[in-house]
Image (cartoon, rainbow, N blue to C red):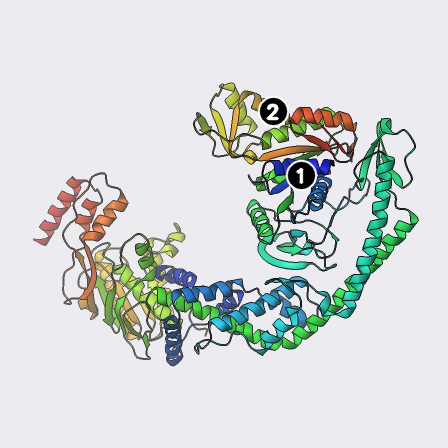
């Protein structure tokens, strides 16, 4: 049986895999290939995952942001030499564009070696093959970055080019003489072009020798220079010399290709090293930018996250001048997060999923401290884009039920289940029952499950730890006419997003009526709702 | 002074560092104009860069099977051209391989080392053309010539001087050729919108239908479009609309001269009559490079 997919589409969207992939994307074709072949760490590979994250953290510490950006700029400029290596592998010749690519590749690899000197956490970016490659094409270097199949590559090439230049000069001279003669005969100051018009009424004598009529019109003649025998012979010699140059150039290209093929194995190794460097620097840059730290990856059950952050939201908030409030959670088996609407319950789930994703990729994680096992899979259960895309085929609850069924089909120990207000669209009684039953079942299979809910008593019924968002510090004042952005800012100012463990039987308030009021729901409706809540409580 | 020098001077006189040659159709002599400008600039010792807006037509004239004129480039000339269209021999100096794509492969910046004929196949998009021209300047070109095409004026830049080529390729009526040239020049020369005057900003294109509506209701405000490519009226319809409406652009172009070619695949017209008729229609200096004459 195949291993279950680590992340399905809905889960990847929910926890921000796409954001992470973009944030640590390499910038060279070598890095892109490295990412393609890299796989996630699995259970049993804890030591390797820890070592990889520690290595990225050391690189992040060793180089500052500017130094890493400079490395990436060099990597981004590296041309892809894979096509050239593929050609020489099958005995084909190189073209000059590929020669330029190889020369620039060698320059870039050597520059990277200098920039990354003495960093033992990165492989060599250059070496003997690269040095020999650069030496091979050095004779063709023009200025700092251009390439020309220079005469110095081969004496025969030089000789053929000299022969061509001589033949060309003799032909041009003879042709120039013809053009001047014709121009003078026609009384024109300038030399005639390849095709020219002679007005019939301007002709006082027959057309001069060396002029051929291409087309006759009633008032003019379209003419061209008709080469005489001597000039035609010179043209023939020029063309013959040009063929000689072409052959000599091909011989040089073939010889260069042959010599590159001997360096191929070393260059392929270097290309792989460059891919590793690219991926590692991208990850280290990200690590440093977001102050990530290696998690403690163990084979034991339980998840502990201290001051964890969900970076996609943190980045968005910071861009708008806001700040992300980290969350801390620790549990083994099952845990519940409760709290008010818009208090950050879902974000707490996403944070844990994101951290687990990072750990499985051998990346440091956005948390002060984190301890977890390598999950074989992460699943997000809740209403998400997947359900919305099903259109009218399934109701919201039916979509969730299908996802629950699919997840439990492949659920295995250490799997991470993130359950976001599961079954919220069905009756509270049944929603409660199915959630509690799922928590029990997942725990029995050894999975780690974290659920966000508004339902009271789930933690007690499921025997799970209970965490709660602190919630609103007072009710923000209603601002008639304020736009939604300003209302959300006002809400954020009043919300205490911190999460703390609470007594198992604590009753939750969703602050839904306060929110409804703040967001502009008719005050009369809100007042009536408050009265109903009061009656129910009594 | 040669006609080609006069043509080059027209571009230089407006301070342009680049000139684009566009035609009213195929086979109207654009390449001959490119060659003339190229030779004139070369004779002045200018470091030249050449490129094209995409690929322009076939290598041979299908009517008389004559090879279309090609550009023979001197050593030192920079070219922004598609990899697949650049010759393998004589070897070129390869300066840069860009990410700009064309139907014939990515665009490369090369320098001619041995005089050779090169087919110009450039970037097909406006942004690609801009990047090509910038790359040519970055590699040392002092003046850039762009082989353009009538259906790709969207790629022209405000900085370019524009030379319009017209000829007997599509019509053997002097009047029709002159009217077509006049309309194209009028389109390219649409004036910049004066922001102090009352205007009607068009998001999309000024189509014949919309123009007819504006004329019918006696629209007196300036009708502003982004650039000449947003005006889809052509020929006499455009000239008629220009008589009745104030059509303005945010991004004007700079036509500086017109060239005529009296010989075409469909037949030929009397060269002097064509030169005079086109001169009268376009109100710009007009040149016949084949007859070495100007009006």
Judge by depth and name the residue closer to the eye, B206 or A97: A97
Compared with A145, A213 (above or below) is above
Which residue position is annotated with label 1?
A: B8
Which residue position is annotated with label 2?
A: B239
Chain letter for the residue marked with disc 1 in the picture: B
The residue sitting at the left extreme is A538
State the quadrant of the C terminus of chain B: top right
Residue A136 x, y percent position in the rendering: 65, 72
- Answer left or right for B184 relative to A475: right
- Answer left or right for A199 relative to A390: right
Judge by depth and name the residue closer to the eye, A331 or B32: B32
* Gap in angstroms between the C-alphas marked 2 and 1: 28 Å
State the quadrant of the N terminus of chain B: top right
Judge by depth and name the residue closer to the eye, A453 or A160: A160
Compared with A500, A211 (above or below) is above
* Label 2 CA crowd tier, 10 Å (few <14, some 14–19, many 20+): some
Q: Secondary structure at mark 1?
A: helix
Q: Earlier in the sequence, mark 2 or mark 1?
A: 1
**Residue sitting at 57 percent across and 64 percent down?**
A79
Q: Which mark is residue A504?
A: none
Q: Can residue A122 be seen from the camera position used here?
A: yes
């Amino acid at each position: 049986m195949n291993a279950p997919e680590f992340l399905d589409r809905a889960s990847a969207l929910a926890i921000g895999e796409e954001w992470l992939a973009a944030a640590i994307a390499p910038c060279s074709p070598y890095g892109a290939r490295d990412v393609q072949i890299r796989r996630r760490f699995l259970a049993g590979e804890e030591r390797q995952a820890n070592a990889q994250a520690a290595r990225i953290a050391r690189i992040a510490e060793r180089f500052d942001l500017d130094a890493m950006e400079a490395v990436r700029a060099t990597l981004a400029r590296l041309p892809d030499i894979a096509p050239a290596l593929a050609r020489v592998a099958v005995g084909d010749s190189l073209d000059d564009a590929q020669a330029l690519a190889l020369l620039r590749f060698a320059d870039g690899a050597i520059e990277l070696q200098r920039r990354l000197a003495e960093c033992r956490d990165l492989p060599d970016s250059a070496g003997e093959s690269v040095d020999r490659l650069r030496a091979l094409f050095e004779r063709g270097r023009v200025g700092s970055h251009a390439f020309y199949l220079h005469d110095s590559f081969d004496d025969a090439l030089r000789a053929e080019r000299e022969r061509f230049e001589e033949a060309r000069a003799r032909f041009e001279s003879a042709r120039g003489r013809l053009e001047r003669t014709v121009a003078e005969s026609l009384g024109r100051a300038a030399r005639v072009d390849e095709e020219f018009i002679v007005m019939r009424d301007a002709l006082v004598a027959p057309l001069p020798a060396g002029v051929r009529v291409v087309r006759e019109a009633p008032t003019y003649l379209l003419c061209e220079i008709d080469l005489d025998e001597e000039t035609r012979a010179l043209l023939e010699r020029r063309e013959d010399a040009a063929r000689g140059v072409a052959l000599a150039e091909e011989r040089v290209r073939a010889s260069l290709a042959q010599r590159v093929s001997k360096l191929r194995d070393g260059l392929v190794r270097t290309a792989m090293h460059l891919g590793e460097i690219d991926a590692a620097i991208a990850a280290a840059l990200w690590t440093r930018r977001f102050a990530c730290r290696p998690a403690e990856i163990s084979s034991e059950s339980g998840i502990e996250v201290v001051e964890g952050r969900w970076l996609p939201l943190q980045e968005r908030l910071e861009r708008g001048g806001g700040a992300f409030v980290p969350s801390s959670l620790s549990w083994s088996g099952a845990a519940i997060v409760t709290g008010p609407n818009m208090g950050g319950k879902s974000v707490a789930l996403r944070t844990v999923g994101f951290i687990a994703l990072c750990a499985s990729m051998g990346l440091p994680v956005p948390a002060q401290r984190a301890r977890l096992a390598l999950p074989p899979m992460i699943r997000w259960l809740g209403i998400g884009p997947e359900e919305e895309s099903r259109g009218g085929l399934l109701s919201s609850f039916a979509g969730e039920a299908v996802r629950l069924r699919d997840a439990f089909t492949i659920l295995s120990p250490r799997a991470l289940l993130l359950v976001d207000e599961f079954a919220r669209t069905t009756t509270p009684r049944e929603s409660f029952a199915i959630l509690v039953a799922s928590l029990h079942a997942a725990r029995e299979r050894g999975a780690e499950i974290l659920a966000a809910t508004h339902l009271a008593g789930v933690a007690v019924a499921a025997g799970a730890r209970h965490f709660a968002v602190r919630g609103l510090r007072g009710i923000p004042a209603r601002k008639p006419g304020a736009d939604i952005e300003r209302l959300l800012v006002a809400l954020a100012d009043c919300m205490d997003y911190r999460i703390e463990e609470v007594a198992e039987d604590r009753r939750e308030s969703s602050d839904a009526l306060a929110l409804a009021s703040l967001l502009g729901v008719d005050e009369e409706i809100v007042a009536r709702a408050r009265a109903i809540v009061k009656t129910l409580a009594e | 002074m040669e006609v080609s020098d006069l043509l080059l001077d027209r571009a230089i006189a407006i301070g342009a560092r680049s000139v684009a040659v566009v035609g009213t159709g195929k086979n109207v002599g654009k390449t001959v104009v490119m060659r003339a400008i190229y030779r004139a600039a070369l004779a002045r010792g200018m470091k030249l860069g050449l490129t094209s807006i995409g690929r322009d037509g076939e290598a041979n004239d299908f009517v008389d099977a004559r090879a279309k004129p090609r550009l023979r480039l001197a050593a030192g000339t920079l070219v922004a051209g598609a990899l697949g269209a650049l010759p393998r021999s004589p070897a070129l100096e390869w300066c840069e391989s860009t990410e700009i794509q064309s139907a014939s492969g990515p665009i490369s910046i090369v320098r001619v080392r041995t005089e050779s004929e090169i087919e110009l196949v450039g970037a097909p998009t406006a942004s690609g053309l801009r990047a090509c021209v910038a790359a040519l300047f970055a590699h040392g070109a002092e003046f850039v010539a762009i082989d353009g095409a009538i259906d790709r004026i969207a790629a022209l830049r405000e900085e370019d001087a524009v030379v319009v080529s017209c000829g007997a390729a599509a019509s053997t009526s002097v009047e029709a050729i002159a009217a077509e040239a006049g309309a194209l020049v009028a389109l390219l020369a649409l004036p910049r919108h004066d922001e102090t005057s009352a205007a009607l900003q068009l998001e999309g294109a000024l189509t014949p239908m919309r123009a007819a509506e504006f004329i019918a209701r006696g629209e007196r405000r300036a009708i502003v479009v982004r650039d000449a490519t947003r005006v889809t009226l052509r020929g006499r319809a455009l000239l008629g609309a220009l008589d009745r409406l104030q059509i303005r652009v945010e991004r004007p172009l700079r036509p500086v001269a017109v060239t005529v070619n009296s010989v075409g695949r469909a037949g030929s017209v009397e060269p002097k009559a064509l030169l005079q008729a086109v001169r009268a229609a376009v109100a710009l200096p007009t040149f016949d490079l084949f007859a070495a004459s100007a009006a």
